[in-house]
Image: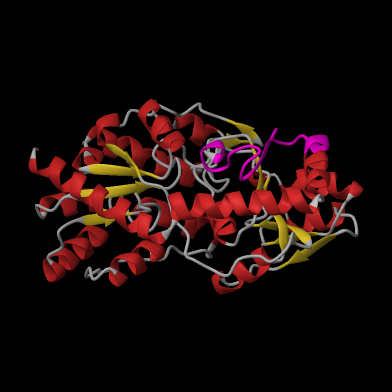
Amino acid sequence: MEDETRLLTQAGHEVSVLAPTPSETGGALELVRTAVGAVWSASAAKEVTSTIRAGKPDVVHCHNLFPALSPTVLRAAAASGRPVVMTLHNYRLACLPATLLRDGRICQDCVGRVPWPGVLHRCYRGSRAASAVLATSITLHRKVHSFDKVSAFFAISRFVRDKHIEAGLPGDRIIIKPNFAWPTEQRVGAGEYFLYLGRLTPEKGVSTLIRAWRDAPAPLLVVGEGPEEEALRRLAPSSVEFHSTVSPESVPTLLRGARALLVPSLWYEGFGKVVVEAYASGVGVLASHIGALPEVVEHGVSGLLLPPDDVEAWQRAAWQLMDDEVSIRLGKAGFATWESRYHPEIGMRDLERAYETAIDLHSKT
């Protein structure tokens, strides 16, 4: 959202941002209270209506509705007479935790149906009560056609689009509009270390890397925080270095020193924005062959696609990248991919075209 706001502003568009932040503390009671607000938030709808009246936008763009907002705001925005678009960053409309993952395995039990299996398994933040409230919100707003108020959905990948069609959204209203990455200084040489950059959660598959690095060709930098951090530190050999989450401004510096970016996901990644950030730095990518990652990483060209959680395969790939020629070749191809598909100018073009399509669809309703 911040990237697109900056992009639009630089192109001369006027942008108003409404971005409430959900509480991250307060225990189970606060979690349920926040989830209840996701069912029907009159205050959020009122704030959206006020923002629209003040700004008189050509289009209203919604990103994440849960949990600080609710689909109520889609109804409020549509009532203003403006076209409404919504980016599908993840699988929240079909899965309570938004990952299509449960207990470390792919799960599609709620896709295309009422999400009560997610309640049974406490899928939303480990709370059955909060899961029930979120499931109620999704089910209610399907029943009252709140999602029909959206003129167009923007899917960040073809894979995300296909999964939402399985979940019941109309394919003729889903536009594929991938993320982009800002230009940055490119890597010089083949890189010194391998890099993981992201949250330390089970679905990210970092434990695969930790096990693979017992036979390490070069250091592995794990940058990020999350609930798995302590367990991963205990498991890690000396060749693995952990660093806390860094600011977005520090990411390009880390990438420029990397031999390859590693994306060992176990879940259906919707896009993997960090992949195109690596490309912008001239760095190749080793990624799991899962979700939308094969759309972004071309095997043998801009990176290597590997079986998820296959320790030996990740070891072999790391050794393969120790060949400087291979590392440089993949990095150059990654940069060419960024220039042709994920440059901000292309991102701006795609976003304006998507808005124009949404406005056209709205005019026909």
| Magenta-drawn segment | 293-313
Residue 6, position in %: x, y?
36, 69
Residue 256, position in %: x, y?
66, 66
On the picture, is 243 further left or further right than 177? Answer: right
**Residue 125 vertical placement versus 310 (above, below):** below
The answer to which quarter of the image holds residue 13 is: bottom left
Q: How many marks?
A: 0
Residue 133, position in %: x, y?
40, 44
Residue 363, position in %: x, y?
8, 43
Let me know if residue 19 appears in the view: no
Residue 304 covered by magenta stretch? yes
Residue drawn at x 63%, y 34% as measured from the top left: 289
Residue drawn at x 88%, y 58% as measured from the top left: 239
What colour scheme has been applied to the protein in the rendered image? secondary structure
On the picture, is 254 further left or further right than 73? Answer: right
Residue 198 covered by magenta stretch? no
Residue drawn at x 47%, y 47% as measured from the top left: 130
**Residue 32 vertical placement versus 94 (above, below):** below
For the C terminus, the image quarter is top left
Residue drawn at x 77%, y 64% as measured from the top left: 242
Let me know if residue 322 appears in the view: yes
The answer to which quarter of the image holds residue 1 is: bottom left
Q: Nearer the viewer, residue 241 or 255?
A: 255
Q: Nearer the viewer, residue 103 or 198?
A: 198
